Image: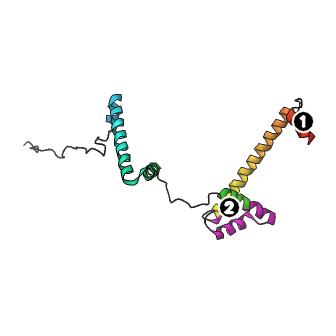
């Protein structure tokens, strides 16, 4: 007894629909086998489509607003909600830290006080305290590097004859 095979295909053949540029999305194999001339032709088609889309956006929104729209669209999406931190947060934290050190206030108490004032310096006391520690550590590294560089320059120029600049400094 032989099995009779169906006369039609099990699945209809897949016809990929063209994208907004009128092109079919290249597969991995298709892009590997694509010639350089075909690739350049595809790139030119996409560029023309983008140019036409920008021209249409300019017609609808005006030049400046269309540019802002395209700038906003090409930005990569953020992973989470953006934080509304103060733009001068690091400088403010260091300033507050220095003032607190003069008063004898601990870093934890400072972080608690700053957190109670608002969220613009950090989301939690721990986050503010960690940021302060990081900033103080970086500032110390910068100060040490500057001291080493100054000493290196002093050592390099200690046996040189006096210059006009050093003579002017010594007269003051």
User: Which residue corresponds to the image point at 17% horizontal and 46% vertical from the top-left?
Assistant: 10
Residue 135 point in image, percent of width and height? 69, 54
Residue 163, position in %: x, y? 87, 32
Spatial separation of the CA atoms under disc 1 and disc 2: 48 Å
Q: Say whether residue 123 is magenta.
A: yes
Quarter of the view holding residue 168: top right
Image: 100 above or below 134: below
- Which image quarter is the N terminus in? top left
Q: Which quadrant of the structure image shows residue 136?
A: bottom right
Describe residue 80's horizontal placement relative to residue 13 as left or right: right
Q: Say left or right for 56 vs 6.
A: right
Q: Does the magenta stretch include residue 17?
A: no
* 161 vs 48: above or below: above
- Residue underneath mark 1: 167
Residue beneath label 2, please?
Answer: 129
Residue located at (71% from left, 66% from top): 110
Q: Is residue 35 visible?
A: no
Q: Where is residue 108 in the image (x, y as percent from the top left)?
A: 71, 65
Nearest the viewer among 44 and 150 is 44
Identify the residue at the far left of this view: 1
Q: Which mark is residue 9?
A: none
Residue toward you, 60 or 131: 60
Predominant secondary structure in magenta? helix
The residue lying at 36 percent from left, 51 percent from top is 59
Taking depth in this image into account, of 40 and 16 the one nearest to the observer is 40
Compared to residue 50, the image places residue 117 above or below, namely: below
């Amino acid at each position: 007894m032989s099995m009779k095979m169906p006369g039609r295909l099990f699945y209809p053949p897949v016809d990929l629909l063209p994208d907004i540029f009128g092109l079919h999305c290249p597969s991995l194999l298709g892009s590997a086998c694509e010639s350089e001339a075909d690739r350049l032709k595809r790139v030119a088609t996409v560029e023309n489509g983008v140019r036409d889309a920008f021209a249409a956006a300019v017609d609808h929104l005006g030049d400046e607003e269309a540019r802002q729209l395209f700038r906003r669209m090409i930005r990569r999406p953020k992973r989470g909600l953006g934080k509304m931190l103060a733009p001068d947060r690091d400088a403010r934290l260091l300033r507050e830290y220095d003032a607190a050190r003069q008063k004898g206030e601990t870093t934890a108490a400072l972080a608690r006080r700053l957190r109670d004032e608002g969220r613009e310096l950090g989301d939690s006391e721990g986050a503010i305290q960690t940021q302060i520690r990081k900033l103080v550590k970086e500032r110390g590294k910068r100060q040490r590097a500057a001291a080493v560089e100054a000493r290196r320059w002093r050592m390099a120029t200690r046996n040189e004859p006096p210059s006009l600049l050093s003579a002017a400094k010594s007269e003051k």
